[in-house]
Amino acid sequence: MPVVSQATHVARRALGPYLRDLRPLREATGADQLRAWFATQTAGGFGFNGDVLRASVVRGLFEVCGCDVFLETGTYRAATSLLAARLLRCPVYTSELNRRFWLLAWLRCAPFMRVHPRYADSREFLVTMTRELLRSAVPFVYLDAHWNEDLPLQRELDILFSAWQRFVVLIDDFQVPGRPGFGFDTYAGRPLSVDTIRFPVEKVAAPSGVYFPAYEAADDTGGRRGYVVLAAGLRDRVAAAQQFPLNLLREHVLTSADAPSPR
């Protein structure tokens, strides 16, 4: 099935039951109509950057890898937090360092028992979660707290690898090799990429996998920002699941060439 048809299919099958106004979604028969509808949702704060394929990948990974909790850094207006709670039906813990955004998120999330916004630096938040959650937990961690000059990503990854043997990480705003249509962030003139961020996979016993979108940015909806997925200790589970939506990912084999280069 073509990717654009998959987008329409998953929107109806997986996302539809959790969205308020389903009529435009039911009437969308092609990619253009679907993109137009999701653009309106994004304007109102649709989660996962308004990217329906990314939302599908998150839901598929969460189920296949047996995740049981969703952690997010960089709450912003809580759009991703709220959509994750609806799609995944699990506890959601999210952190925001900007007090104004945290207060807004707290107000938006107050009616939802599953969502727990924390006012904290992302690194402090993750350290706290390693103490609150069981070591047997399998968290899905959505890292999106890297929009200031300070880049916490490497420390965030080190905390996760020191706490759990099995977890899934999705890093937003990441450069996708061979897919220039996806946007990404830069720090000190260097892109967020496998050349600047290290994945300490040697700290977990079971094989890990690194994955990028296998589709073009034009096939998705919303912000079309790049991302990378790391299935720590869970590569075998992802490899065994070749059906949609996990066939939207392609594995990237880490080599010595991917080691972060000195500044």
Image (cartoon, rainbow, N blue to C red):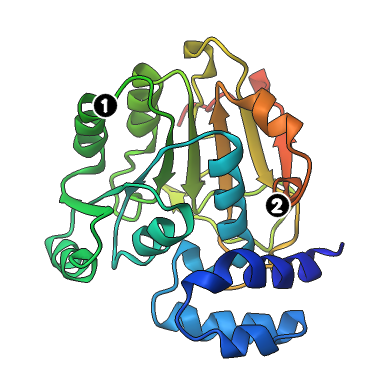
Task: Please determine whether, in this image, residue 44 is positioned above or below residue 239.
Answer: below
Q: How packed is label 2: few (under 14 Cα within 10 Å), some, or many (20 or more)? A: many
- Please tell me which residue is depicted at 35% across the width and 58% down the height of the picture: 81
Residue at the disc numbered 2 = 245
The N terminus sits in image quarter: bottom right
Position in image of residue 64 (x %, y %): 61, 38
Q: Is residue 223 visible?
A: no
- Please tell me which residue is depicted at 57% across the width and 31% down the height of the picture: 231
Say which amino acid is labelled 1: Thr
Position in image of residue 192 (x %, y %): 50, 45
Position in image of residue 253 (x %, y %): 71, 27
Indicate the secondary structure of the residue bearing disc 1: helix
Left or right, 96 with respect to 219, comes to left
- The total number of labels drawn is 2
The C terminus sits in image quarter: top left
Q: Residue furthest top?
A: 205
**Disc with the residue nearer the chain's start (1 vs 2):** 1
Left or right, 133 with respect to 20, comes to left
Q: Which quadrant holds residue 38?
A: bottom right
